[in-house]
DNA sequence: GCGACTTTGTGCATGTGTTCACAAGCGGCT
DNA sequence: AGCCGCTTGTGAACACATGCACAAAGTCGC
């Protein structure tokens, strides 16, 4: 979550818990050459890809890969949208954010779409992953075939438990968490996965950041504090279940055994979020 | 997102993004049409709560529980929002969806808030969980302490592997997936967790539905088809990493030495997201 | 009881994301 | 060539979510 506080306004305008209703003078905009990347320039917004669309692009990529393996050469937005579980208009709009690679009257070339989505998602480069906390979940993550096969090689593992140090898990020897900074720097880890107990998560996070990690996927049920140069996504399994619980309760409260089918909405499945997570959330 | 999302993340509609991204999450809740004016409070209110707010309520609940353990009696929206990583206005709006339980000039009673959020999320009732696919991830989930401690007792485990049948994992004996329908009915499982390889996911899902499961948390990277009486949330680890990858790429493009790859302007992602996803190049 | 102070709850403006609906563009057929 | 049917790409309407800012409503001290 974005818990970085102030960022608006160029001036620091400390969120003085006190009063201060002095609105910053709002310096004459005139964006000129100044170009300060920390300022959300409105003009760049136009080129922004919505967060939700990014999440879906990753899903399209997976579906397209499966189609390519089946020897499919081209695909229409309708076919692809059904396979991905979204509606076709949304799919076309999502694809339009990355460019115009379709042929009207025909559809999209599967290979082209795969290349372009990979380019946008930054998958042309490998991203080293470090997993911290080699408990049940960490073990599963270290052995998870879906990571390396999609361009995310796991290159470092960490834990506090002395009995685990040096033991190979999924082909990688476990290091002590005190070595996070050194090892992550050496191996140029760009993504850190936190699978530790909640109490240790923030400390681990700090070390990962110090070790140069740019992104963190957090499985611990805590809100992490990070500098705004670092990206955090969280996956909270308990929260996911609670959201499901809410829907059960809502349904139970309402109509009893009368499943209302309102003409619209077939089995839609969506992501997130992304939020979430999602392991998100 | 989002986290979502996904979420966002995630499940119906969403991660966001977030989700873990699980992220994601968000599309309109398909509302049942049955409108019974005699059932006012709970249902109408529940129906009015935005999807994104539900995800956050679960987070508030966790934070509140921690505060209660520390003996905290009351809390202000400001304190709670900081602990949860959101801004205070959003937090108050989220809480307002479930009713007015605060005292102006004072804050909220921790105990009251916990009770009310639990009520809204349907946590006053236990939800039995079944985990299908006892591989690395399934093992981790079966042993995950976060489930039972939050009202989600794991009461059934399934796998295809004959060597696993009967073996207790986390205190529960593994059953064969052919018995999903029977066992889920007997034990009144309301939430199914799919941690199988992608190829088996849809078949497993169908059996869970047949066994009376109302909600599914899907870790397999496939889009499940279910009747609209069933709620699905998905957690796709590869997608989460790809979303992070996207942000790394954007940041590198933008702030870095401007690699001016090809004429196509590099899209910039703007910030947003539950799940804490900040972006900002 | 009164005024100063604190904090909730919410109307409103803004920003994001989704959906509709259709013009534009392409291939194929005659 | 000219027409026809199919599919993309997108403008515009709509729906949802966020954040600001402030009145309402309570506490506290005197």
Image (cartoon, coloured by chain):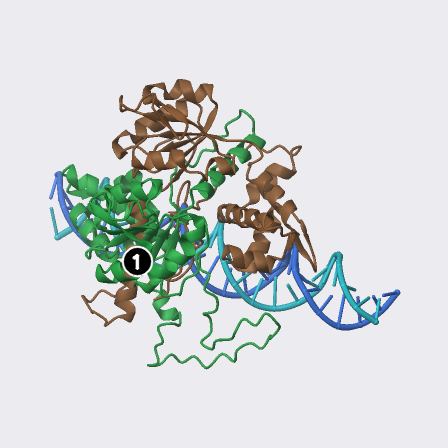
Chain colours: A green, B brown, C blue, D cyan
Above or below, B118 against B225 in this view is below
Above or below, A247 against A30 in this view is above
Give percent across and percent down for residue B208: 39, 26
Query: Furthest residue to the front?
Result: A162
Q: Give the number of callouts.
A: 1
Residue at (30, 44) in percent of width and height = A141
Res. B75 image quadrant: bottom right
* Residue C22 located left or right of residue C30: right
* Residue A96 located left or right of residue A238: left
* Residue A96 located left or right of residue B216: left
Q: Between A83 and A106, which is closer to the camera in this rendering?
A: A83
* Residue A226 located left or right of residue A131: right
Residue at (20, 49) in percent of width and height = A114
Residue at (55, 36) in percent of width and height = B123
Q: Chain of mark 1?
A: A
Residue B5 can be seen, yes or no: no
Residue that numbered label 1 is attached to: A180
What secondary structure is marked by label 1? helix
- Tell me the quarter of the image containing the N terminus of chain A: bottom left
Give percent across and percent down for residue B80: 57, 56
Give percent across and percent down for residue A180: 30, 58
Q: Between B84 and C17, which is closer to the camera in this rendering?
A: B84
Res. A214 image quadrant: bottom left
Q: Between A139 and B116, which is closer to the camera in this rendering?
A: A139
Residue B171 can be seen, yes or no: yes
């Amino acid at each position: 979550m974005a818990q970085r506080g102030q960022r608006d306004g160029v001036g620091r305008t400390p969120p003085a818990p006190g009063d201060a209703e002095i609105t910053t003078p709002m310096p004459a905009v005139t964006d000129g050459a100044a170009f300060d990347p920390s300022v959300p320039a409105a003009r760049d917004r136009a080129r922004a890809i919505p967060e939700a669309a990014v999440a879906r692009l990753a899903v399209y990529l997976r579906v397209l890969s499966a189609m390519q393996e089946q020897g499919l050469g081209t695909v229409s937005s309708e076919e692809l949208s059904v396979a991905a579980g979204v509606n076709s208009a949304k799919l076309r709009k999502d694809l339009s954010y990355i460019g115009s690679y379709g042929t009207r009257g025909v559809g999209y070339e599967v290979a082209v779409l795969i290349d372009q989505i990979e380019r946008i998602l930054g998958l042309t480069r490998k991203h080293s992953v470090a997993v911290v906390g080699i408990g049940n979940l960490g073990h599963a993550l270290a052995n998870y075939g879906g990571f390396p096969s999609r361009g995310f090689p796991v290159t470092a593992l960490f834990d506090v438990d002395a009995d685990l140090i040096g033991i190979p898990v999924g082909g990688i020897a476990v290091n002590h968490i005190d070595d996070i900074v050194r090892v992550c720097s050496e191996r140029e880890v760009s993504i850190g996965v936190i699978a530790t107990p909640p109490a240790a998560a923030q400390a681990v996070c700090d070390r990962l950041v110090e070790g140069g990690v740019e992104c963190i996927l957090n499985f611990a049920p805590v809100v992490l504090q990070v500098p705004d140069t670092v990206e955090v996504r969280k996956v909270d399994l308990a929260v996911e279940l609670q959201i499901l619980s809410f829907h059960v309760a809502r349904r139970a409260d309402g109509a009893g055994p009368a499943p209302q089918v309102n003409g619209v909405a077939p089995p839609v499945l969506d992501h997130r979020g992304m939020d979430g997570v999602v392991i998100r959330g």
